[in-house]
Image (cartoon, helix red, strand yellow):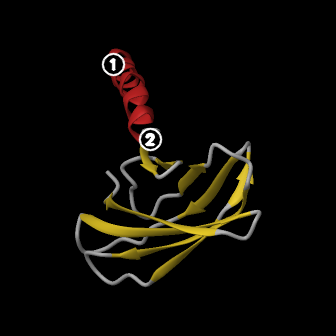
């Protein structure tokens, strides 16, 4: 009995690093002069997610945005970005859809200190968690 329990513990310990690696993947997208990172990159639904926008310069005053479902109407998710460690970051959670894989549309508005604004767009897919 003890050897069976030990084997189960060993198998669970062996699987843990793979699971951690799966949930910490990052998807990066280049949008004009910005790098947008999705964490985790496979965007599981009903899971805390993080978006990071690296502007490469300190002239950005504010970043706002929204996410809308493309595959299916899911309302609009507002994004509130904060400047943390020289990156603009927003936390979010995507709702589950009847589709195991759903396409979303991200739209960001970047405001510079001089008042100029630009819009950045990207589309991505979410998935059901394992």
For residue 96, what is the image quadrant?
bottom left
Q: Residue at x 44, y 41 (%)?
A: 26
* Residue at the disc numbered 1: 7
Q: Residue at x 71, y 59 (%)?
A: 82
Q: Nearer the viewer, residue 25 or 62?
A: 62
Label 1 near label 2: C-beta < 8 Å? no
* Residue at the disc numbered 2: 26
Q: CA distance from mark 2 to mark 1?
A: 32 Å
Q: Position of residue 122 (x, y in %)?
A: 39, 62
Mark 1: few/some/many CA within 10 Å (<14, 14-19, 20+): few
Judge from the rendering whether residue 54 lies leftward or rightward of residue 46; answer left or right.
right
Judge from the rendering whether residue 18 lies leftward or rightward of residue 91; answer left or right.
left
Q: Residue at x 44, y 47 (%)?
A: 30
Number of marks in picture: 2
Q: Position of residue 114 (x, y in %)?
A: 76, 65
Judge from the rendering whether residue 58 lies leftward or rightward of residue 92; answer left or right.
right
Q: Residue furthest top?
A: 3
Q: Residue at x 64, y 54 (%)?
A: 89
Point out which mark residue 110 bears: none
């Amino acid at each position: 009995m003890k050897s069976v329990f030990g084997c189960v513990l060993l198998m669970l310990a062996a699987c843990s690093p793979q699971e951690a690696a799966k949930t910490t993947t990052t998807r990066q997208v280049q949008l004009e002069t910005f790098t947008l990172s999705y964490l985790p990159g496979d965007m599981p639904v009903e899971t805390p997610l993080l978006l990071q926008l690296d502007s490469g310069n300190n002239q950005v005053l504010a970043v706002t945005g929204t996410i809308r479902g493309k595959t299916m109407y899911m309302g609009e998710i507002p994004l509130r970005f904060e400047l943390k460690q020289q990156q603009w970051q927003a936390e979010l959670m995507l709702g589950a859809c009847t589709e195991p894989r759903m396409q979303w549309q991200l739209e960001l508005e970047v405001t510079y200190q001089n008042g100029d604004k630009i819009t950045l767009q990207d589309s991505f897919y979410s998935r059901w968690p394992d």
